[in-house]
Image: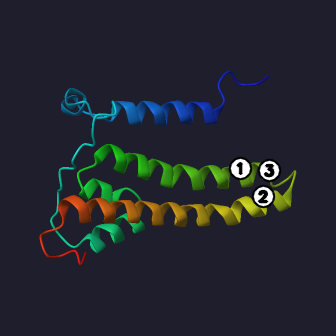
């Protein structure tokens, strides 16, 4: 018997609710998320953007938390942990049926984590350089 809800569907709905529910009341009142404008982050640290990017590379989402983007930070952390774990679980489950596919999934898991870490680091760096860095610290 097939399950009523696919695990992927449950994860997709949870992420959508997280993104929509991540906007605070003040952001909704300002029209953020409705196409009116972007919410300016509340920076928690005023430091070199490279440090924030490095923090987000090591732990995806940490740089976003430091930039004051809690919803985005939680999303980056969740995706950074859920994707590799799902690939590893898939590799374990399929290993008896298709060892080659299991090997590919096992190799892809750390590569996906690395790619997501790079994406998270670049996002944290760019946001910090645009909104949070002290004057004269960013070379451009």
Seen in the picture, residue 59 relative to 21 is either above or below; the reply is: below
- Residue found farthest to the right: 97
- Where does label 2 land, which residue? 102
- Of 83 and 130, nearer the camera is 130
- Neighbor class of circle 2 (other Cα within 10 Å; few <14, some 14-19, many 20+) is many
Rendering coords of residue 72 (x, y %): 36, 47
Q: Can the viewer see residue 59? A: no
Q: Quadrant of residue 43?
A: bottom left
Task: Identify the residue at the far bottom of this view.
Answer: 139
* Element under disc 2: helix
Q: CA distance from mark 3 to mark 1?
A: 6 Å
In percent of the image, x 24 and y 56: which residue is there? 67
Q: In the shown orientation, is residue 82 left or right of residue 27? A: right
Secondary element at tag 3: helix
Q: Residues within 10 Å of mark 1 (few under 14, many from 20)?
A: some
Element at label 1: helix
Contact, mark 1 vs mark 2 (Cβ under 8 Å): yes
Residue 39 appears in the picture as rendered: yes
The quarter of the rendered structure image containing the C terminus is bottom left
Query: Are dots 2 and 3 in contact, CB under 8 Å?
Result: yes
* Residue closest to the far left: 135
From the image, tell me which residue sits under label 3.
94
Look at 68% across and 21% down and name the residue there: 4
* Residue 28: quarter of image: top left
Mark found first going from the N terminus, 1 or 2 = 1
The CA span between labels 2 and 3 is: 6 Å
Quickly name the residue at label 1: 90
Quadrant for the N terminus in the image: top right
Asked if labels 1 and 3 touch by Cβ distance under 8 angstroms, the answer is yes
């Amino acid at each position: 018997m097939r399950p009523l809800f696919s695990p992927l569907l449950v994860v997709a709905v949870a992420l959508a609710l997280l993104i929509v529910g991540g906007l605070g009341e003040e952001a909704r009142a300002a029209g953020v998320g409705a196409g009116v404008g972007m919410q300016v982050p509340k920076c928690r640290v005023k430091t070199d953007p490279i440090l924030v990017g490095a923090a987000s590379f090591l732990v995806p989402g940490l740089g976003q938390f430091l930039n004051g983007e809690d919803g985005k930070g939680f999303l980056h952390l969740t995706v950074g942990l859920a994707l590799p774990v799902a690939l590893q679980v898939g590799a374990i489950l399929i290993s008896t049926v298709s060892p080659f596919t299991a090997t590919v999934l096992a190799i892809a898991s750390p590569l996906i984590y690395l790619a997501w870490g790079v994406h998270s680091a670049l996002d944290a760096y760019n946001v910090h350089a645009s909104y949070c860095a002290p004057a004269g610290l960013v070379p451009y």
